[in-house]
Amino acid sequence: NAGVTQTPKFRVLKTGQSMTLLCAQDMNHEYMYWYRQDPGMGLRLIHYSVGEGTTAKGEVPDGYNVSRLKKQNFLLGLESAAPSQTSVYFCASSYHLGQYNEQFFGPGTRLTVL
Amino acid sequence: GNSVTQMEGPVTLSEEAFLTINCTYTATGYPSLFWYVQYPGEGLQLLLKATKADDKGSNKGFEATYRKETTSFHLEKGSVQVSDSAVYFCALFYNQGGKLIFGQGTELSVKP
């Protein structure tokens, strides 16, 4: 099993450009998450999904959109990138939301917006 | 609201030293508590967890005890190795919100 994979690993954008980050998991997990990691701030939840076709806002959703058309994929879109979106983005997935929840993380995408 | 506070880093230790990374939390109800570790250039991995008061989570020589009376979940290891150099995140999960809340992370550097 590959676990959770993310594409691309690195990307540099200019302000105003758009892009999509792809997350894929092969563990048949129902729940998927997008986080951003910034220095001194830990991980903050952007959006999440509790199943195919469903999405919900997390802590910092502004400027991002997501889609979960297939159970194994969770896409994060930036419609008009801003320098404030320079960050490392992590995707995660989990089997369920219970108290024994363990989230499995991808390797991250480092995004720089100039 | 629910939150997690960790001791600030970076923490620099010599090999075989004793490690403590403090973590305290604020939460309603009875959250589950986790420590995740992030090695350089990688994503986060679950290190250990505890789901109720007085539970002790342990893995790879690391331990943490869920202390409800002090709302703490401090991470300890008796003898660190160079390979333990990483960023450590304390996190809580509460059922009502259905989400993980992370602390800011503590960077550990172990020197030979």
Image: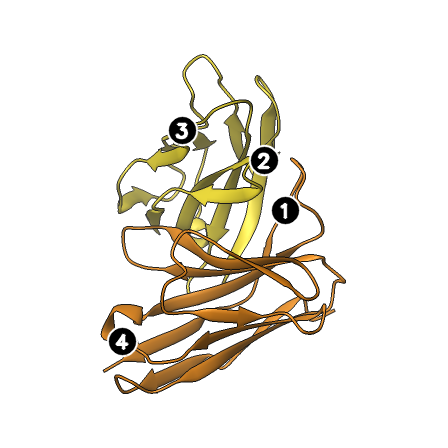
Residue B25, numbered label = 3
3 and 2 marks on the same chain: yes
Q: Nearer the viewer, mark 1 or mark 4?
A: 4
Circle 3 chain: B
Label pair 2/4, CB-CB below 8 angstroms: no
Kindly identify the amino acid type of the residue bearing the numbered disc 2.
Answer: Lys
In the rendered image, the vertical position of residue A114 relative to residue B54, given as above or below = below
Secondary structure at numbered mark 1: loop
Chain-order first, disc 1 or disc 4: 4
The residue under label 2 is B49
Kindly identify the amino acid type of the residue bearing the numbered disc 4.
Answer: Ala
Name the residue rendered at 57%, 17% in the picture: B54
Crowd tier of the residue under label 2, counting other residues whose Cα lies within 10 Å: few below 14, some 14–19, many 20 or above? many
The residue under label 4 is A82
What color is chain B drawn in?
A: yellow
* Distance of label 3 from label 2 (alpha carbons): 14 Å
